[in-house]
Amino acid sequence: MSEIRATSIKERKIKQHGFDLAFDIIIKVLSVLIIILVMYPLIYVLSASLSNPLAITRGQVWLFPKQFTLEAYKSVFGNSKILSGYKNTILITGVATLINLAMTTICAYPLSRKDLWGRNVITIFITFTMFFSAGMIPNYLLIRNLGLLNSHWSLILPGAISVYNMLIMRNYFQNSIPDEIIEASTIDGCSNIQILLRVVIPLSKSIYAVLLIFYAVGHWNSYFDAMVYLSSEAKYPLQLILRNFLLESTQIKDDLGLTATIAEASLSYVSLQYAIIVVSSLPLVIAYPFMQKYFTKGVMIGAVKG
């Protein structure tokens, strides 16, 4: 009887092992397919930016560059508008992200403290603003009345804090900073500001890395607010210059009545467009891997708990 039972258990283990093996194979195959789907557009853009425009328009570029050339990148870095846009984007992203993190911390930390009277009511009022906004025209009138039109501050101050990101940081403070540490710091004579600066922030690197990515990517990719509030081309961010460039290149081809092949061969619009995409995306692509470990930890703790 015991031999039959042992044989049955062994057969179940073999079946379970076979099921686990098949499941692992399916997961790995799906993962490879997803990686290919995600990576191929990036590789294609990079290859196209290094290829001859004629090869691109003829559909000869698939994976590797055809007729390798750096002319597109020479044109990008030789274009004063693009360099000016790059400088403006770096300035706006850097200043705005620092303000975002400061304002988010100032709002999230008090709401995470259990000794703050009425914090739940305050949180409800703040959350209410996530679902209702004045709209584009009232916002424009507000920016105009504040004297911020045609200023980089019009792209920075209106979005100084994100309620969603503030709630993530508040949850992180509540669930990841032990109350005993706060109490010990209070007993040692630390004020609330000292607790925040010396205890809470040093223990919250992961959530700051997450919000740094969220805010920076949002500012880096933004162009609509600049299109509405800025009138001076010298103050345009890179994304708006890229958008205008794409529209201008399409308009020129339509006005001249040229075929796509002739237009791209003479003006190198195709490869230049891809080169601008690569140049505009490169800083974030380089920065993300260094923050990956903090990003995963911060999102899981800050968003799932609480």
Image (cartoon, helix red, strand yellow):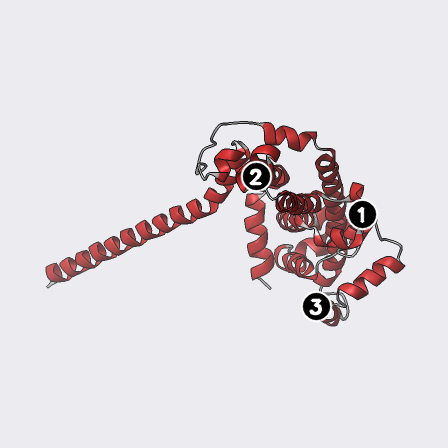
For the residues labelled 3 and 1, the Cα–Cα distance comes to 27 Å
Residue drawn at the location 76% of the way across and 44% of the way down: 236
Residue drawn at the location 58% of the way across and 48% of the way down: 295
In this figure, which residue is indicated by the disc labeled 2? 270
Residue drawn at the location 74% of the way across and 72% of the way down: 121
Q: Quadrant of the C terminus?
A: bottom right
Label 3 sits on a secondary structure element that is helix
Residue 297 at x, y = what percent? 56, 50
In this figure, which residue is indicated by the disc labeled 1? 152
User: Residue flagged by tag 3: what amino acid is it?
Assistant: Thr
For the residues labelled 2 and 3, the Cα–Cα distance comes to 45 Å
Residue 237 at x, y = what percent? 73, 44
Residue 233 at x, y = what percent? 78, 43
Closer-to-camera residue (159/189): 159
Label 2 sits on a secondary structure element that is helix
User: Residue flagged by tag 2: what amino acid is it?
Assistant: Val
Residue 196 at x, y = what percent? 75, 51
Label 1 sits on a secondary structure element that is loop
Q: Are marks 2 and 3 in contact (CB under 8 Å)?
A: no
Q: Nearer the viewer, mark 1 or mark 2?
A: 2
